[in-house]
Amino acid sequence: MELPPKVKNILLLDSEGKRIAAKYYSGDWPTNTAKEAFEKAVFSKTQKTNARTEVEVTALENNIIVYKFVQDLHFFVTGGEEENELILASVLQGLFDAVNLLLRGNADKREALDNLDLIFLCFDEIIDGGIVLETDANVIAEKAGINSIDPNAPLSEQTISQALATAREHLTRSLMK
Amino acid sequence: MAQPYAKKDDDHDDELEYSPFMGIEKGAVLQEARVFNDAQVDPRRCSQVITKLLYLLNQGESFTKVEATEVFFSVTKLFQSKDTGLRRMVYLIIKELSPSSDEVIIVTSSLMKDMNSKIDMYRANAIRVLCRIIDGTLLTQIERYLKQAIVDKNPVVSSAALVSGLHLLKTNPEIVKRWSNEVQEGIQSRSALVQFHALALLHQIRQNDRLAVSKLVGSLTRGSVRSPLAQCLLIRYTSQVIRDMSNHGQSGERPFYEFLESCLRHKAEMVILEAARAITELDGVTSRELTPAITVLQLFLSSPRPVLRFAAVRTLNKVAMTHPMAVTNCNIDMESLISDQNRSIATLAITTLLKTGNESSVERLMKQITNFMSDIADEFKIVVVEAIRSLCVKFPLKYRSLMTFLSNILREEGGFEYKRAIVDSIVTIIRDIPDAKESGLLHLCEFIEDCEFTYLSTQILHFLGIEGPNTSDPSKYIRYIYNRVHLENATVRAAAVSTLAKFGFMVESLKPRITILLKRCIYDSDDEVRDRATLFLSVLGGDGTVDTDKDSTEFLFGSLEVPLVNMETSLKNYDPSEEAFDINSVPREVKSQPLAEKKAQGKKPTGLGAPPAAPASGFDGYERLLSSIPEFAAFGKLFKSSSPVELTEAETEYAVNVVKHIFDNHVVFQYNCTNTIPEQLLERVNVIVDASEAEEFSELTSKALNSLPYDSPGQAFVAFEKPAGVPAVGKFSNTLTFVVKEVDPSTGEAEDDGVEDEYQLEDLEVVAADYMVKVSVSNFRNAWESMNEEDEHVDEYGLGQRESLGEAIKAVIDLLGMQPCEGTETVPSNARSHTCLLSGVYIGNVKVLVRAQFGMDSSKEIAMKLAVRAEDVSVAEAIHEIVANG
């Protein structure tokens, strides 16, 4: 019954432990309450640690959790206690770098919420139903990034009005910063 | 430090201003989702709305069936748009909405079109979405495309199809199994991930075919696998093959060990770790085999990456349990990890060191740990305390430094669980190491001088009362105990009074002084404290005739042998007007129910259609029920009630189960019947029992059930007489007889005329285990030694071939119906031998203890050595007879 490496969940929490995005692939947490309780436990166990340069790791409730933080974003990947933590770490690193690429280097909560669609797509490209789909950050970012409002995207696919809308939004965003 | 604060405030403001999801509300978003239906699709707008929907779902919001269906239908319209970004979001939301099978039809054609699109991204994603929502019949239609996709030259498409295959294998194995040729081709792929996914799928397809798996592993270990992930998988499969082969009696050189060892030199660290772990987990691994694995793990210990250090120390920690000597080489590296930033790593390092440490290093280690303890959380501290306890048991000579350490940390700040772990450890050490007793007791005394936990204070006082009087100078504890009477709350005061009394009773010279102290307590403000003081004063005042002495000893030191819950219910039921309360009338059956419930709750959703509770279940319920029936009231005290045994298959017209009630002279069968047909009313329901295969039983009386309406359970009873105190066994066949009356479903009224009918039930057996009550003992060794050694009966049995030791142990426990003690019913994996401790009370109130040693040889033949001690020799023989016949 040896199974391929399994990821139980991917979490992206903010600096107060609130969920920005989360995806669960295991039935261990059947309700949203159970999920939130787990997230709270994970967050409080790790918040005082410094996981900004290297991927850190801990064990909680028979799970292995690897994590890494940047700004006010806290990334977590959970696997079972028998799991190879280096595989989990490679998933986390892939996710972390891909999000950084997609958010063009200023990964923080605001940017993440503004581009939540990219984050969701990123999750979708890394893990499929608990199975590792891809761990190379460049590939993940490339696949998820199709949707980004990329000025280099072929203009033929945008109508003039859409192009204008895009430009307008870019302008307002830069003004608001 | 100032900066982060300022930043936090900034963030907060930003959030209020900028979060695109501020004040988002489901109703409004669902309203917005109407844009999906616009004739001219605006991809940007639609993408945003889908993101909002996904955000809501992600935050735990749920859509009603109607809402989900509505969103799903409007989303399907978006397939018209050619915008790739939007299409990507459409795929995502469809997966999240997980539409029902009749809804899936709507999107199949669109998705199938995408599956054959020229755009790779469409193909890959359409496959993943379709496979997620599809059912078996549709799958056969698209099977052809999926097979093609597996061998597609684009790795993303190929991976998508393979991973989908892995998921589909669970629901439609017969279809996926037909793809093995294509999957085989995938293994040769140049793409690392395709290779990984193909290997995973191919193994899953063949997992039940040992030979095929072995061949697969054999061919791949010769080195065609490139991807590290696939290599990790291959290592897992290899260790499985090794396990299977050794289970099938192939001995000699361990096959594939060389492959595992070669993986230790792989360039990817995850492969090295996987291989090292596989080697350490080999069955009966030799130290020569272990050495190379330990060496690479040792290198990991000094890696700058925390994950590597954690992985290595975690593995070594496990190895240390079975092969402590193999790990000692790493001790120096491990010691430097005690100061590791990551506390999980530090704790693992310490507990490993405690397992591998030799006697001479204990003191140095304790010094290091002392510094470390102050800055870790309680949960880590508890792990350390437990490791120290086992270390102390291992090196009794070192108790002094370990005890000092424990008493020091006992004085520091800490929560209840942590303090309790320390107190438990000290108590264990005192019990196991006689030399440690006096100093240990004094540490505990000091602790209760300033202890904020009532529970711990009372436990320690109780323990003092038992151990204190036997020390060389009992009087020195009195001061600590009497201080409690002045300073603590009523619960602790009462416990202190009891403890004082024990000293007074056991130590003759202290008696007068204790009497004076107790006299002061009769003016206490609390009833219980006053009562106890008065009671003990009169016990101590007695003139030491032999008889009262014995009673008092029993009273002061005897343990209550009945479970407290049962005691409580019995006392509640006790009617003061009748005769005095008899403690022997309290049932001793331990209820194991709560544990099972806890387990069940863990995974399954609760609440939905939970079956209504049976009117009377549990020992107390049965006892009340039976004593309320005049026919059975004279049978005396109920000895045991079995758990219900089903006599019908699930979902039959009439559901019947039976509970066997055992009395000294009688057996009563309680048939719980349920009528599951709404259009019927059953009357005069009776069970005809044929006891021709149960010679020692003779039917005495039966009690029919007058009426059994739809869905409201009722009980019929049949009582048998049997020889007194004898564990008679036999087989009974049962037939349900009744009168059926039709019920008009609209009015609910039954017709007047009924038809007689009968219904065959399954047979029922009374077995030896029915005469055994599960009773746990708190300290098996003490109980075992208190029984006469000469009455011990030992014999050996061969149990034949079994799947595992655990299975054999379970079979023996079930056969004897006894209570496993001290968690010995669980067998560590890979164990070749195991000792299981059982206790119970046999009919006639005879206490029985069993020590069963199991051993398994390489061909899974299991042998058992069974030692039985009982208060009555004939019972010990009877137990052996049960096993011999079972």
Image: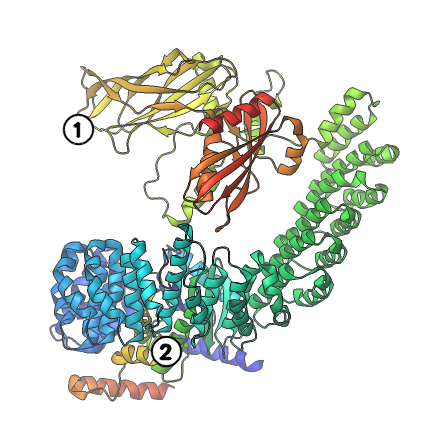
Which of these two is toward me, B166 or A172? B166
Quarter of the figure with residue B316: bottom right
| Mark 1 Cα-neighbour bin, 10 Å: few <14, some 14–19, many ≥20 | few
Q: Position of residue B650 (x, y in %)?
A: 28, 33
Determine the secondary structure under disc 1. Answer: loop
Q: Residue at x 39, y 72 (%)?
A: A91
| Disc ID at residue B746 | 1
The amino acid type found where label 1 is placed reads Ser
| Mark 2 Cα-neighbour bin, 10 Å: few <14, some 14–19, many ≥20 | many
Q: How many numbered circles are shown?
A: 2
Q: Which residue is mark 2?
A: A99
Q: Position of residue B758 (x, y in %)?
A: 24, 18
Q: How is the image coloured?
A: rainbow
Q: Residue at x 77, y 46 (%)?
A: B437
Left or right: residue B610 compared with residue B419:
left
The answer for how far apart the CA atoms under marks 2 and 1 are is 64 Å
